[in-house]
Image (tube, grey):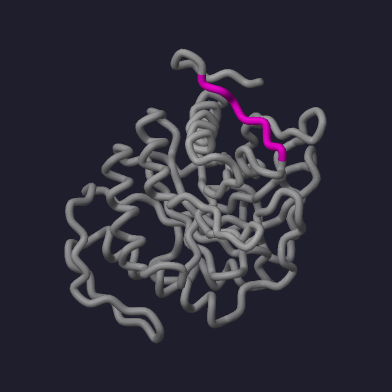
Amino acid sequence: MALPRTGLLVPAGTAGEAGQALEEVLATAQAAEQRGFDALVLDGRPRADEGRWRSFDPFTLLGACAAATSAIRLGAIVSIGERPVSLVAKAFATLDVCSAGRAVLVLAPSGSFGGEPDAPASAEPPGVASIDDLAEALAIVAAMLATPAATVTGRRLAVRAAWNEPRRPVPPPIAVALGRPADGVLAAVAAWSPPPELVLVDRLAPPGAPASASGAASGAGPVGSARSGPPVLELRAAPRGPAGTTDVPPPAPGVVAVLGPPGGRGGARVPRRRSGLTTLG
């Protein structure tokens, strides 16, 4: 499958009743597929809400999305350090099998990636240590997806004879999320071995802003731009509907639209499933 050129980012957390939240995520996945999005991405990092962690496990939830869809790619943003990298690779490989090769993994440095539709992203770029950790995590996951028993030794992260079978013969793509990268970061990431196949940058712009509005200093640009290195997708807040609601927007090349929390405080209006069909409203 080709790399995604458009995406819809949906929180894996919820402030509502669990069963209703599940239905809303599945309906959103179906609506994104029907609207023509290339990928649905769950933000799998836990979020604190009134002192409680509210988040589904993203890989388990994506397994349900795989059963409810047929063509859209299914991804999750996972912060390194949140769970062992070897378990991330195993869960990702299993999702890739369950979805018939539609999985996409997005690795993010801890605390560096915003993506909140109602709040500004962090102005601080990922530090050197977190970028180095991200490169080592990427190397571990890539090795475990390419070989049955991978051994990778980094300065901070390592695996030895990490078994990962069964898995599909063609490894799925691995992306990285870089927040608002400082000058030179994208060039450094392109020189990693292996490099990521896709990069997400956190530049939430007002709805309706052109896709090329990202800062030229960092070298970021939409998929298909002349910039060398991995293709870049840029986060954009989804357009607001009436009374502060958020509809599933139409896809835009080079952009990942950020949808508010299903059933949560963001007032996101998501599709409802009726008799096997997905409708908006």
Taking the spot 28% from the left edge, 40% from the top edge, the residue there is 98
| Outermost residue, bottom side | 155
The N terminus - image quarter: top left
Residue 189, compared with residue 251, is above or below; it is below
Location of residue 37 (image quadrant): top right
In this view, 275 is above or below 186: above
- Of residue 46 and residue 213, the one placed in the foreground of this image is 46
Residue at horizontal 58%, vertical 45%?
Answer: 9
Q: Is residue 217 above or below residue 102?
A: below
Give the left or right position of residue 169, taking residue 109 as reference.
Answer: left
Q: Looking at the image, which is closer to me, 23 or 119?
A: 23
Tell me if 231 is positioned left or right of 63 in this view. Answer: right
Q: Residue at x 57, y 46 (%)?
A: 14
**Residue 185 percent location from the top left of the image:** 60, 71
Q: Position of residue 66 (x, y in %)?
A: 37, 35
Q: Is residue 231 magenta?
A: no
Position of 240 with respect to 165 (left or right) is right
Residue 277 in the image, given as x and y percentages of width and height = 49, 16
Expressed as whole percent of the image width and height from the top left, the position of residue 44 reads 50, 54
**Residues shaded magenta:** 267-273
Does the segment drawn in magenta span residue 270?
A: yes
Instruction: Please report the residue visible at 33 percent of the width from the left and 69 percent of the height from the top.
Output: 140
Task: Please tell me whether the stretch drawn in magenta is mainly helix, strand or loop.
Answer: loop
